[in-house]
Every structure is written in structure tokens, then in C-alpha cells.
Image (tube, coloured by chain):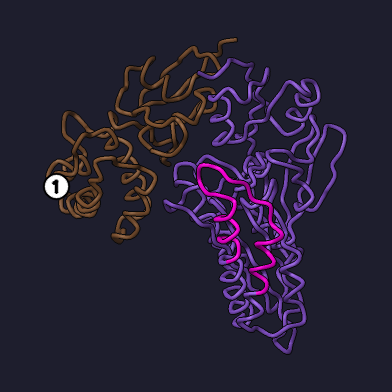
């Protein structure tokens, strides 16, 4: 049974930030709770106060313009999955959301909740990092912005201070000749990934890789950029040996653990194979678009 | 500290006094006596606790009752009208889609949400819609047939 707590239901963002400040250190924010309530039921998290922001409509939005994309923290996974505008301009986001847990969880779980939970096996973070996303963090007296890549510090640990809230994710426009691909390895479809790989390739006019990103999920204490693998690709043409080399680098530089789902060695092998496959797919997508 | 919340369940308004830690599932089963929604894994994997919240399937075991304040909930008990089964329920009976029955309330509600949104689903869409409802009897084939047939039936009756 969940240990009891005081439930706070702010009327707007400002009130929520005030509550966070007042109860800093004793409060957890709930924004869908599809992961948090499991931890609370298991007794791993037992806050004095629970501040519910899920119902804050002012943070539920998907906005697209010439500066890119902005997503409010209380936007549900299902809304991202079903957005026609996203399917057109950032198709990798709905593609990733489609296999994030069950429909039931996607209907109630939110992007802000998912990122703040900071499970290294989460699906959205690697994809958003590959897209160069930033997060906006708010306190009662101001906001700051940081690269999503820097937001994750350790297992279930983020840069959020005790009185700070993730309010928005922003994604820059996707450059021309860019392809992105994401895949996670699961035993049952839509399950938590044992390992995931996201690849993003931007080609120059001659068809060589001008920029490459490889981001791994479930392969380290945080979502991990496989920079060694990225370096292998830059300035090169698409060749099978190159993909092999990038996959091998990624499997060497990741830091997976062994647990009941998979051994460290198995995870490294998955990283090698998925990195190779996703790079090929991203490269082909970049060449087409 | 207990809170007073109001919920609409199967069209009826309810005011319930709950501890914040109470899940929506516990309120439905223990306070309102609606035992159709089941507690399975309590981890968000099995879907046995699925109910519709503002028309969308959600997991009532991973939702605090206080979060559902002011929302409209539909459980399996709310589908039949005046003693007459909903076309989905009839189709499940006709196609022998019910074995032990534990997953069926959730599965039917997931199917209802699908048909409400997409009246002419393909077999693939049906499978996707119920993919969050695990059946340990593995009786998926007849459930899929029943859902595909339910729509035809519903239209035939209009």
C-alpha cells in the first residue's frame, strides 16, 4: 500500500512553483504518475507532499513554428503520438511514442513526467537528445534552459533542483538532408526497452555525413551519446564497414549493467547491432529527404 | 488528510471521501462496489484495471482517485443498457471470446474506445488497441474476431 501523503492541487503554474518552494525537499511532483506511483507503491519513494500538475492545461501544448517545436510538460504521450503536425515535421517523435508502453499509459502519462523520472531506459530522451532538444526549468523566481543531454545526471537523477520544475521541451528545426531512426529491443512489443538506439545523420551536398548523433538508452546510468561512434561517421560516405565500426565503438563506450532482463554482454551486443541498423536507416532516410 | 472528490461513474455522480493514496481502482471496487475492473499486476503491465476516463482507456491502478476529480469514468458495468448487453459484450459471448474472464472488462473497454474513435478498424488496429490488455488464457484470436464482428452488429441494428 502507498504511504499516505498530503495532496496538493495547484490552480496554475505559478501556484505550483510556490508550493514546490514552500515544500522543497519534502514534495514530489506528479504529472501522470505512470512510473512514480509504482515506486510509491513499492515504498521506494514516500513524499510528504504530492504536487499534482497533470491537470494544468497551460502546460499542455505542441507548438510548431519557424523556430522549431515546443512541447509543454503536461502533454500526454498519446497526444504526441497522434499529432499530425509532428508526423509531418518530426516524424520520429510519433514513431517513438507509438511503442512507448500501452495505450492506457500513453493516455495518462506525460512527456514532462517521463523526462523528470529519468529512467535511463526511457524512450523519449534519446530521441529528443538526437534532435538537439533543450528543456526549460522553472522556479518561483525565474527560469533557465539547458540541453536535455545535460539534464540527466545519474539513474533517476536530474539537474532539477528541489524547487524546480521542468515546464517545456524545445526542439530546433531539423536541417535538410537529415534522417533519424529509433529502435528499442523488447521481449514484448511496447514493453520497456532493454536497450535502445537512436541515430541521426545529416548529410552534406555530396552525400557525406556532415553530422551524426548516436544516443543509447538502457546502456548507461543516463541516456548516453556514443561520441566515439559519431566520430567514425563524420565526413564519410555510407559504407558497410563504417557502420560496423560505429556499432563496435558504441558497444565499447557504453556502460550497461547486468540485471534480470539482460546481462552486460548481451546489452553490449544489442547496442552494437542496433547502432549499426539505426545508422543505416537514418542515413537512408537522410538521403531520401 | 482526507479529501472529498466528485466523480461521474457510468453516468452517475458520486461524492467520495478518500485518502490521497487511494487509487481510482480502490474507489471503484471498494467504495462503489464496481468489481468489474480487476487488480492484476499493479505495475502497469496487464491492463486488467482498464477503465475509460473521459472516453479514453487508462489504468485505474496507476491513477490516484484524487487525480480523477471531476472526470467521467466508465467501467464495464456501465456498458449494458436496461439489462441488454452492449454489442461488444454480445459479440464476446457469441464468439466464445471469454475464458477465465479476468482480462475481459479491460479488453472490452479498450475495444470500445477504439470503435468510438475509429468505427472501421482493421484487424491490425484491433490488435494494437487491445495490446495493453494481457490475457493469460491467450484467448486473443476470438477476442479480435468478436471486436471486428461487434461493429458490424452495431451498424446492422441502426
Chain purple in the figure, letter = A
- The local crowd at label 1, few if under 14, some if 14 to 19, many if 20 or more residues have their Cα within 10 Å, is some
- Location of residue A39 in the rendering, given as x and y in whole percent from the top left corner: 57, 29
The answer to whether residue A276 is above or below residue B59 is: below
In the drawing, does residue A278 fall left or right of residue B84? right
The reply to whether residue A78 is visible in this rendering is no
Residue, far front: A265
Residue at x 66% of width, y 56% of height: A126
The answer to whether residue A47 is above or below residue B50 is: above
- Location of residue A13 in the rendering, given as x and y in whole percent from the top left corner: 73, 34
Q: Name the foreground residue: B52 vs A229.
A: A229
Q: Which residues are magenta?
A: A245-272
Chain brown in the figure, letter = B
Q: Name the foreground residue: A238 vs B28.
A: A238
Residue at x 41% of width, y 18% of height: B14
Q: Is residue A264 magenta?
A: yes
Element marked by disc 1: loop
- Location of residue A157 in the rendering, given as x and y in whole percent from the top left corner: 73, 38
Residue, far left: B94
Residue at x 35% of width, y 34% of height: B48
List the residue tagged with mark 1. Answer: B95
Residue, far right: A141
Q: Name the foreground residue: A213 vs B23.
A: A213
Question: What number of labels is visible?
Answer: 1
- Most common SS among magenta residues: helix
The answer to whether residue A193 is above or below residue A242 is: above
Residue, far bottom: A206
Amino acid at each position: 500500500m502507498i504511504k499516505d501523503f498530503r495532496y496538493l492541487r495547484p490552480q496554475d503554474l505559478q501556484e505550483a512553483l510556490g508550493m514546490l518552494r514552500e515544500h522543497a525537499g519534502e514534495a514530489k511532483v506528479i504529472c501522470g504518475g505512470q512510473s512514480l506511483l509504482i515506486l510509491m507503491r513499492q515504498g521506494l519513494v514516500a513524499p510528504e507532499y504530492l504536487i499534482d500538475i497533470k491537470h494544468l492545461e497551460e502546460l499542455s501544448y505542441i507548438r510548431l513554428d519557424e523556430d522549431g517545436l515546443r512541447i509543454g510538460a503536461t502533454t500526454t504521450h498519446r497526444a504526441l503520438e497522434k499529432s499530425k503536425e509532428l508526423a509531418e515535421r518530426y516524424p520520429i517523435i510519433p514513431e517513438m511514442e507509438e511503442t512507448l508502453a500501452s495505450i492506457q499509459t500513453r493516455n495518462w502519462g506525460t512527456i514532462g513526467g517521463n523526462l523528470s523520472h529519468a529512467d535511463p531506459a526511457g524512450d523519449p530522451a534519446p530521441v529528443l537528445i538526437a534532435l538537439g532538444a533543450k528543456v526549460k526549468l522553472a522556479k518561483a523566481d525565474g527560469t533557465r534552459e539547458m540541453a536535455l543531454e545535460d539534464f540527466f545526471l545519474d539513474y533517476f537523477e536530474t539537474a532539477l533542483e528541489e524547487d524546480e520544475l521542468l515546464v517545456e521541451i524545445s526542439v530546433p528545426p531539423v536541417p535538410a538532408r537529415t534522417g533519424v531512426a529509433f529502435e528499442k529491443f523488447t521481449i514484448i512489443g511496447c514493453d520497456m526497452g532493454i536497450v535502445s538506439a537512436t541515430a541521426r545523420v545529416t548529410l552534406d551536398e555530396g552525400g557525406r555525413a556532415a553530422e551524426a548523433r548516436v544516443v543509447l538508452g538502457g546502456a548507461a546510468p543516463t541516456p548516453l551519446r556514443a561520441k566515439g561512434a559519431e566520430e567514425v561517421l563524420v565526413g564519410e560516405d555510407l559504407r558497410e564497414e563504417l557502420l560496423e565500426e560505429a556499432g563496435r565503438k558504441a558497444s565499447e563506450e557504453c556502460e550497461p549493467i547486468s540485471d534480470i532482463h539482460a546481462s552486460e554482454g548481451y546489452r553490449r551486443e544489442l547496442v552494437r547491432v542496433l547502432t549499426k541498423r539505426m545508422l543505416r536507416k537514418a542515413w537512408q532516410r537522410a538521403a531520401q529527404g | 488528510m482526507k479529501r472529498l472528490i466528485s466523480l461521474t461513474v457510468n453516468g452517475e455522480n458520486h461524492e467520495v471521501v478518500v485518502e490521497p493514496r487511494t487509487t481510482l481502482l480502490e474507489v471503484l471496487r471498494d467504495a462503489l462496489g464496481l468489481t468489474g475492473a480487476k487488480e492484476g499486476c499493479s505495475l502497469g503491465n496487464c491492463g486488467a484495471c482498464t477503465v475509460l476516463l473521459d472516453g479514453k482507456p487508462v489504468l485505474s491502478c496507476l491513477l490516484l482517485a484524487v487525480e480523477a476529480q471531476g472526470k467521467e469514468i466508465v467501467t464495464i458495468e456501465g456498458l449494458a443498457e436496461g439489462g441488454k448487453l452492449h454489442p461488444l459484450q454480445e459479440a464476446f459471448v457469441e464468439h466464445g471470446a471469454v475464458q477465465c474472464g479476468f482480462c475481459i472488462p479491460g479488453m472490452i473497454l479498450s475495444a470500445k474506445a477504439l470503435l468510438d474513435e475509429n468505427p472501421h478498424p482493421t484487424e491490425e488496429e484491433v490488435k494494437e488497441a487491445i495490446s495493453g490488455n494481457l490475457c493469460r488464457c491467450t484467448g486473443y484470436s476470438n477476442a479480435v474476431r468478436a471486436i471486428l464482428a461487434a461493429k458490424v452488429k452495431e451498424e446492422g441494428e441502426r
